[in-house]
Image: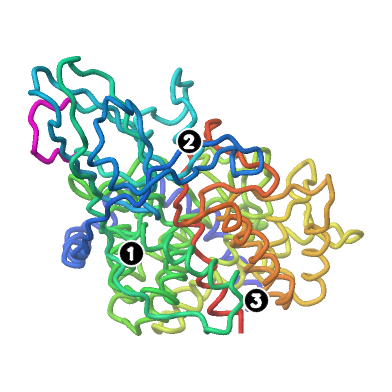
Amino acid sequence: MNKIIILLTTLFISVSFQTFASTQNDVFANDRAKWLEIAENLKPELKYEKIRPLHIVKAQKDKNAFQGWKFNIVDKADKIYTKGFKTMWSVSLDFGNHYTGYFSFKTKIISKVMDSPIRLKFTFAELPAELNTPFDPYKPGLSRAWLQDEIITVTEQDKYITIPRRLSFRYVKIELLGVSGYFDFAIDDMYINAQTSAGDLKVSVPENSPQIIKDINKVASNTLKECMQTVFEDGPKRDQRLWLGDLYLQALANRYSYQNFDLVKRCLYLFAGTTTKEGLTMPCCFERPKPHTQDHFLLPYSLLFSSTLLEYLNDTNDYQTANDLWKVAKRQMENAFSYLDENGAYNMQDKRRPWLFFDWRKNLDVTVSIHCAIIFAINQTTELAKKIGKENEISHYKAIKEKIKTNIINNYFDKQNGVFVSGKNKQISQLSQAWAIIAEVMSGDEAKRAMKYVLTPNQNVVKVGTPYANHYIAEAMFKCGMNTEAKEYVVSYWGGMVKKGADTFWEAYDPNDDFISPYRFHPQNSACHAWSCTPVYFIHKYFK
């Protein structure tokens, strides 16, 4: 009987790619419109608040400050409204916190009469260094248009002008580019109409918690709040869209903060409604003008659809949604299996070449990580199936999992050092061990030994470079019983950002490199990024 199961499993793996490649019809054609309608009906009402600047500030170079710049308070922001702008020509203001929304201002004449237009340049920034780093000449990378600088020509006084693009910032610099020498003017008012769908926090940390824990929780909650718009965005400055990898982490953090489960549901339906004709969830989703995706496929993110749906079910007991979207979750698994050979080995040379993103760290080998991510997805999908009575549909998963597990243990486990080595060059990385633990490929003392090995300073170990990957490092530590060390890790890493002035957590952070940037230009980094918000989850789940 076991031989028959193994034979059928091997057959399933070998033919599943052909099944996908030969699929000509839209596999979810009968569901797509319904799913998108459900998503649209769940679109939240945004909450708005007009926020005005608190202080006029002056930039100062400081080698001890994050990225070499800090702001010093000069005066209250109200002073700008009574001062002729031609006496300043340039001024920087601090709104006191990170906000997302639309910026409006108006001017007034304070001397003589207006006989020419006024041209102003506004530069908005999340961080002090962003406001003090020249954007031009701009080297190729991400679009220059992501940088938040706008030139506005004022032709009428006493009339509010709203900058058309949505902005995300704490600081703004206003520069005078052109005006007649005949008259003078002042800024009469300015504000950001800050927006979020977050609502009030439903969970708080105990009053007797250490201050650093309170601070980390506050910054993490604020990060999530700013990313909660009409979807869970990855970053309100950049990329302003829904990403599946970020959504999984946001769903975890949402449970212990705003508990807006309808927003999680909306995002799940958006991903389901925008699957490809082959039924694959794409890594990101745009809302406007109508829901759509890009044309690249990110396999590890697609594997997190099951996990996100499972977490949503655990939070809500919404079995109707779980059953409705089960077919999408199962489709992602079928696709993942199509990359495996008969021995359960992932084909890294597969001509489809999906994006295997786990971290922005350069030269990171992800061979072990992708195998373990598939195993983790099998575990999560199996748990989901048990909850909704679909075990019979995935009875072959167990044999596939055992094949993958046997393959990576036989080919990538270094018994001498007790760690997984990844790829042809046998790379030792923190992330490989983390994913092996999360996938339950190793556990207990063996897992602790591996994590301690890669967390001990060693130039031969490849570290991670983003809060996204660091989430999985911390999760693995908690999972294998390293609770004390894991708490210290969270406090050290995310607390390090707090100590460097973060009011929201950053997209990229290396304690030893303030200028780390996947885009080779740190002002392009998002300083409020969804995948950084999970200390909320860690603190409330494990810090007890």
Task: Report the Cα–Cα distance between label 1 and label 3.
Answer: 37 Å
Q: Is residue 173 above or below residue 530?
A: above
Residue type, label 1: Leu
Q: Circle 1 sits on which residue?
A: 268
Find the distance from the CA under tag 3 to the CA under tag 2: 57 Å
Callout 2–callout 1 Cβ contact below 8 Å = no
Residue at (23% x, 41% y) in the render: 81
Query: Of tags 1 and 3, which is closer to the observer?
Result: 1
Q: Camera-side residue: 54 or 22?
A: 54
Circle 1: is it few (<14), some (14-19), or many (20+) Cα within 10 Å? Answer: many
* Residue bearing mark 3: 2
Q: Nearer the viewer, residue 99 or 5?
A: 99
**Disc 2 residue type?**
Pro
Reading the image, the residue beneath label 2 is 523
> What kind of residue is marked 3?
Asn
Numbered disc 2: secondary structure: helix
At 56% across and 41% down in the image, what residue appears?
A: 350
Q: Nearer the viewer, residue 265 or 259?
A: 259
Q: Quadrant of residue 161?
A: top left
Q: Residues within 10 Å of mark 2 (few under 14, many from 20)?
A: many
Asked if residue 155 is among those painted magenta in the image, a careful observer would answer yes
